[in-house]
Image (cartoon, rainbow, N blue to C red):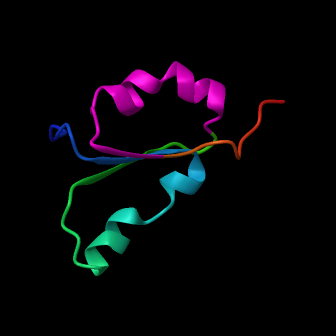
Amino acid sequence: MRSLSRGETLLTGSSLTELFPICELARSRGIDDIIYNRGISGLNTDEFLQHILPLILDLQPAKLFINMGTNVMT
């Protein structure tokens, strides 16, 4: 497994994020920045908060995009 770089761009959230083709979209527009997608299908806000360290804080991103709130606990 290759090591991850800190200080890059990070997307995280649920399946809408996981399935969003951000890297392909960026490359098609000539953007060569490193972009990590840490979206997880089915992730809800409570689970997100439980896993915030490995999802976000370990990478110390320079830019962070979070998409949460579409999955609810029943």
Q: Is residue 58 magenta?
A: yes
Furthest residue in direction front, as rendered:
62
| Vertical placement of residue 14 versus 24, above or below | above
Location of residue 25 in the rendering, given as x and y in whole percent from the top left corner: 37, 73
User: In the image, residue 19 lies at what x, y percent?
Assistant: 51, 59
Name the side, left or right, on which 66 lies relative to 60: right
Q: Residue at x 27, y 42 (%)?
A: 62
Q: Residue 45, position in %: x, y? A: 64, 31
* Above/below status of 70 relative to 44: below
Name the side, left or right, on which 63 lies relative to 17.
left
Determine the residue positioned at 27% across, 32% down: 60
Magenta residue check for 48 = yes
Query: Which residue: 27% across, 33% down?
Result: 59
Answer with the quarter of the image where residue 42 lies.
top right
Residue 41 locus on image (x, y percent) = 58, 45
Identify whether 73 is placed above or below 23: above
Q: Quadrant of the C terminus?
A: top right
Which residue is painted at 60% across and 26% down in the image? 47
**Which quadrant would the N terminus be assigned to in this image?**
top left
Write the start and end of the magenta stretch as one range. Answer: 43-65
